Image (spheres, rainbow, N blue to C red):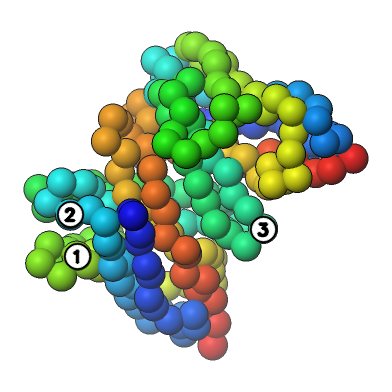
Amino acid sequence: DIQMTQTTSSLSASLGDRVTISCRASQDISNYLNWYQQKPDGTVKLLIYYTSRLHSGVPSRFSGSGSGTDYSLTISNLEQEDIATYFCQQGNTLPLTFGAGTKLELK
Amino acid sequence: QVQLKQSGPGLVQPSQSLSITCTVSGFSLTSYGVHWVRQSPGKGLEWLGVIWSGGSTDYNAAFISRLSISKDNSKSQVFFKMNSLQANDTAIYYCARRGSKGYYFDYWGQGTTLTVSS
């Protein structure tokens, strides 16, 4: 199985900050990398698929980049509603696997 | 709009089975697959399996012996069943729609919180 690693489990930032969350795959996943946001009530939403494609309705302050094994999610101009946990997921090979998540908190 | 609504028990005894129904709206099960994912404190998010639009299934090998996913297209319902539950199956269980452009989940259900305890 492909292992997904998010080395930062929690991150503190201020409103208006630019925040970058990283994710690494145990092998090349050919840009099949997706990002999700989970709110404290358990609600999960897709933010970005295939490394950098923004899902419908997702604000443009979210962006994704990367290739091979290393990927990142960037939130420019952090807003209060962005306080959540963020997960990466590889969509290259079954079984689909997730990172452990990065919890974003306000400084 | 696309919605997935889950129904199922919150408490199950050890060795019993779990059944969850995911009722979808805003799309057809004949056009989209539905995945199942769970989240536990110990293992984080785990992909469990998928039923594709044509009705075939794929399961995570770790669960294949005790997992079954089926559906009724006419009722827009997907059925999840896991047998022989133990305490470490305590988790939030989600259904999620397959994204149209690959192996990702574009819309999620609200989650079913399951506790396995006697």
Q: Residue at x 48, y 20 (%)?
A: A52
CA separation, marks 3 and 1? 29 Å
Kindly check if marks 2 and 1 are in contact, taking CB atoms under 8 A apart as contact: yes
Which residue, given by chain and number where applicable, does mark 1 sit on? B76
| Chain hosting mark 2 | B
Examine the image and state in which quarter residue B67 appears: bottom left
Q: Secondary structure at mark 2?
A: loop
Q: Quadrant of the C terminus of chain A?
A: top right
Q: Nearer the viewer, mark 3 or mark 2?
A: 2
Please give the chain letter of the residue carrying mark 1.
B
Report x, y in % for residue B49. Answer: 31, 51
The residue that disc 3 covers is A40
Residue type of the residue flagged with mark 1: Ser
Picture disc at residue B7: none
Residues at marks 3 and 2 touching, judged by CB atoms closer than 8 Å = no
Q: Secondary structure at mark 1?
A: loop
Tell me where residue A59 appears, x and y as whole percent.
56, 34
Q: Position of residue A105 (x, y in %)?
A: 80, 44
Instruction: Identify which residue is drawn at 21% across, 47% down.
Output: B32
Q: Which residue is mark 2?
A: B28
The answer to whether residue A67 is left or right of residue B97 is right
Residue A97: x percent and y percent?
Answer: 45, 38
Q: Amino acid at mark 2?
A: Ser
